Image (tube, rainbow, N blue to C red):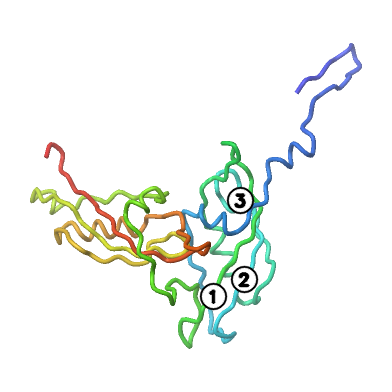
Amino acid sequence: MKCSFAGLLVVSSCLLPTAAQVASDVVSVPEQTMRRLLIHTVKATPSGDLQIGSESVVMLKATIDKNGNVENLKMVSGHPMLVPAALDAVKQWKYRRYEVNGIPKVVETTIRVEFSKVSEAGYGTSAAQAESPVPVTAEDMHDRLVYKVAPVYPPLARQARIQGTVILRIIINKLGEVRDTQLVNGHPMLAPAAVEAVKKWRYIPYESDGETVEIQTGVQIIFRLPGA
C-alpha cells in the first residue's frame, strides 16, 4: 500500500486490491475434482427412525479455504431430516490444498452426500458398493497415498525382538478411504498394529473409464527394531 501526505491534507493514493484481484483468490472447482483431494471424511448419520425411501441425497454448496478446511456450507437440496446430519459431517471433512500454478486458492464447489437405507430402523451414508472392487497393483497406488499413519510398534513384540513384514489386502472406497483390511501374511503380534494404522490411510480416489471406483490392492508394513 502506498500513501502520500501533504501537510494537514491527506492525499490518498493507496493502492488497494481491485475486486478482480480479490475474486482471483476464489475459484470454482467441480465436485469430482475436489473428491480426489479428500483426505479425511466423517460419516453422516442421521438420528431417529427415518422412513423416507430406499435412498436419499443431500446437495450442499461449500467454500473450502486455502488450507483445505470446509468453511461455509449451504443446502442446495435434500430431505430436511437428512440435511443436519450432512452439514454436521461435511464441516469436519478435510481436503488437500487446491493450487493454481503453485498458489493455494479458496474453492467454491458442491458436495453430494448420499444416504442409503442400512436397516428398517435408520439410514447411513453408503460405504460398501454393490460392484466388485477393481484390482490395482500396489505400485500404481503408491503415488496416490496422500495421508499415511505409521504403526505403533507393539511393546510385547519389541520386548521379544520380533520384527518382519506384514502384508495386507485392502479395499479403498470411492472417497479414498480404507474400508476393509485382510491379513495376507505377517506375525500375529505385529498384524493388529499394521491394520490399525492402515485403516487411517487416505488415497486419491481411483478412476476407471472416467468413473470413480472402489479398488482392491496390497500394502506392506515393515517393522524393524533400531540397530537390526
Quadrant of res 168: bottom left
Q: Helix or strand or loop: what does disc 1 sit on?
A: strand
- List the single residue furthest toward the top: 7
Distance of label 3 from label 1 (alpha carbons): 23 Å
Along the line of sight, the residue nearer the viewer: 163 or 9: 163
Give the amino acid type for the residue marked by disc 3 in the picture. Ile
Q: Is residue 226 above or below residue 140?
A: above
Residue 115 numbered tag: 1
Residue 113 is situated, as x and y percent measured from the top left of the image, at: 57, 68
Give the amino acid type for the residue marked by disc 2 in the picture. Val
Label 3 Cα neighbours within 10 Å, binned few <14 / some 14-19 / many ≥20: many
Residue 70 is situated, as x and y percent measured from the top left of the image, at: 58, 53
| Residue drawn at the location 34% of the way across and 50% of the way down | 149
Along the line of sight, the residue nearer the viewer: 198 or 209: 209
Cβ atoms under marks 1 and 2 closer than 8 Å: yes
The answer to which of marks 3 and 2 sits earlier in the sequence is 2
Residue 197 is situated, as x and y percent measured from the top left of the image, at: 30, 55
Quarter that holds the C terminus: top left
Quarter that holds the N terminus: top right
Residue 58 numbered tag: 2
| Residue drawn at the location 71% of the way across and 40% of the way down | 24
| Residue drawn at the location 27% of the way across and 51% of the way down | 151
Label 2 Cα neighbours within 10 Å, binned few <14 / some 14-19 / many ≥20: many
Give the amino acid type for the residue marked by disc 1 in the picture. Phe
Distance of label 3 from label 2 (alpha carbons): 18 Å
- List the single residue furthest toward the front: 209
Query: Label 3: which residue?
Result: 64
The answer to which of marks 1 and 2 sits earlier in the sequence is 2
Q: Is residue 210 above or below residue 141?
A: below
